[in-house]
Amino acid sequence: MKKIKWVNDNRMLFESDHKTFNRQTNIISTGNIIANTVIGQHIRAYTETECNGLTRSEGHLRNFDLQGFMRRHIPRRVLQAVKDSTANRSAWLYELLHYNNMGLWKDDQRIVHGYVLTSGDHFLIRSFVTGPTWKSRSVVNEATKYLAHVTE
């Protein structure tokens, strides 16, 4: 994984071809995260049923973990890949986005560039470019360096 370099106390250096995304990025990091340009969530395995001393049916905890992404209209192909990858093991899912007219923070102003799916120990499973321009690929490729160990 790429080591974070800080521009100042509140913002990391992020260098993609998308200037607006770069400017809005305060941090891209692994784990459960809600930051200016990334939302990350641990996704439990379909077979995981125990949580806080309670037993749930298979798939209940995974569906709970995916609720936020589904409310934000995750593409079907991404959702299917997450479900396939989490049949028997947990994973991490990261959504990469920026806002037009930052400060309004409305859903119709949100531009999603893509998703990064990693294993529980942060090895890259798959990345998805879903953004509207060619710059989205650069955003996803650069962010993947901070979110996943990439095996060649």
Image (cartoon, grey):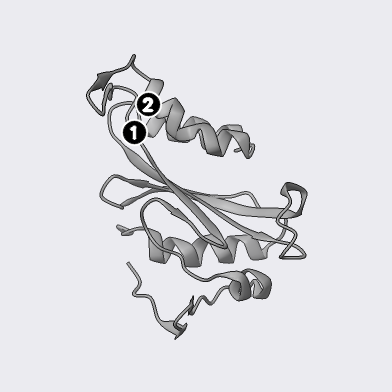
Count the numbered circles shown: 2
Q: Earlier in the sequence, mark 1 or mark 2?
A: 1
Instruction: From the image, tell me which residue sits under label 2.
Output: 61
Q: Is residue 82 above or below residue 101?
A: above
Q: Amino acid at mark 1?
A: Arg
Q: Quadrant of the N terminus?
A: bottom left
Pinpoint residue 78: horizontal percent, then vertical percent.
Answer: 53, 38
Q: Quadrant of residue 36?
A: bottom right
Name the residue rendered at 54%, 38% in the picture: 68
Q: Quadrant of residue 97?
A: bottom right
Q: Could you tell me which secondary element the residue under label 1 belongs to?
A: loop
Q: Is residue 129 above or below residue 63?
A: below
Name the residue rendered at 29%, 22% in the picture: 47
Q: Which mark is residue 44?
A: 1
Q: Is residue 69 above or below residue 26?
A: above
Q: Amino acid at mark 2?
A: Leu
71 horizontally vs 87: left or right: right
Name the residue rendered at 31%, 45% in the picture: 119
Q: Residue furthest bottom?
A: 8
**Dots 1 and 2: beta carbons under 8 Å?**
yes
130 horizontally vs 58: left or right: right
Pinpoint residue 33: horizontal percent, then vertical percent.
Answer: 44, 54
Pinpoint residue 104: horizontal percent, then vertical percent.
Answer: 75, 59
Q: 10 Å neighbourhood of mark 1: few (<14), some, or many (≥20)?
A: many
Q: Quadrant of the C terminus?
A: bottom left
86 horizontally vs 94: left or right: left
- Cα separation, mark 1 vs mark 2, equals 6 Å
Q: Residue furthest left?
A: 53
Name the residue rendered at 75%, 54% in the picture: 109
Q: Is residue 104 above or below residue 52?
A: below
